[in-house]
Image (tube, helix red, strand yellow):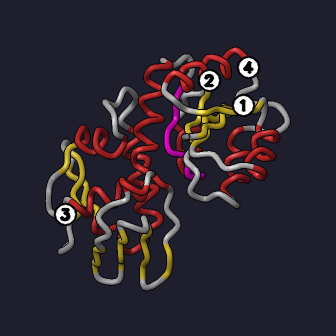
Amino acid sequence: MTRILIVDDEEKIRSLIAKYAAHEGFETEQASDGLEAVEKCEKSNYDLAIMDIMMPNLDGFSAVKEIKKTKPNMPFIMLSALGEEYDKVHGFDLGIDDYVVKPFSSKELMMRVHAILKRVSPAAAGSGDIMRVDGMLIDYSARTVTINEERVQLSPKEYELLAYLAKNSGIALTREQLLQNVWGYDFFGDDRTLDTHVKLLRKNLGDYAKYIVTLRGVGYRFEKTN
């Protein structure tokens, strides 16, 4: 059974999320702050964590950073009353998968959970094929990217964005197509989320960022011959 860790200092919010998660068939555990979340992750494995940002003892960002040291592929959805772009960029840079601003729809939150779990499951990893572009190699089954035989550290979302662009090489992809196919649901938030991830992805790819071409007013295209 899929196990989800719910981390929030408000008991009512934890209980509400746990109720909806149980209805979806998920097993849940709860933590009241980031420190407790880190301790639980040291002792147990979870398929996904829903984590608040502003908490006592240890905030959500710090907790994610600590947990990622031993569980780099664990997916995270961050919850916060904060909606500033800086907070989103900081979270995505740490490797979180999604960002939900309070107050939120529990139904929408569960949709996001399902979308993330579907993408990170072994069945969704790909057919095992490998794509090579000069010195960059994308291994779809292993969900890894290497450049000149050195592993590139990408967040799960950055990898999924690159993989989708590369699999559709040469095709102009609209912002709407990218949001729906990479994020896995009808996107409700600010589409600057896409631009933020492209910016982070390009930074991590270094010289190979040139293969991601911006199509002004449209979206992006992966262009091998650029």
Q: Report if the CB atoms under discs 1 and 2 are less than 8 Å apart.
A: yes
The residue that label 2 is drawn on is 18
For marks 1 and 3 on the same chain, the one whose residue lies earlier in the sequence = 1
15 or 25: nearer the eye? 25
> Quadrant location of residue 3?
top right
- Give, as a three-letter code, the residue at label 2: Ala
Q: Are marks 2 and 3 in contact (CB under 8 Å)?
A: no
Mark 1 and mark 4 lie on one chain; the one further toward the N terminus is 4
Q: CA distance from mark 1 to mark 2?
A: 8 Å
Count neighbours of disc 4 (C-alpha within 10 A) and say few if under 14, some if 14 to 19, many if 20 or more: few
What residue is pinned by disc 3?
A: 169
Q: What is the distance, in whole Å, between disc 2 and disc 4 at their CAs? A: 12 Å
Q: Earlier in the sequence, mark 2 or mark 4?
A: 4
The image quarter containing residue 194 is top left
Q: Is label 3 in a helix, a strand or a loop?
A: loop
| Foreground disc of the pair 2, 3 | 2
> Who's the residue at 47% across and 65% down the image?
204
The span shown in magenta is 94-101
Q: Position of residue 8 (x, y in %)?
A: 71, 28
Horizontally, residue 29 falls left or right of residue 130, namely: right
Point out which mark residue 10 bears.
4
Q: Nearer the viewer, residue 164 or 21?
A: 21
User: In this image, 85 relative to 199: left or right?
Assistant: right
The disc, 3 or 4, on the residue closer to the chain's N-terminal end is: 4
Instruction: Name the residue rendered at 81%, 41% in the picture.
Output: 35
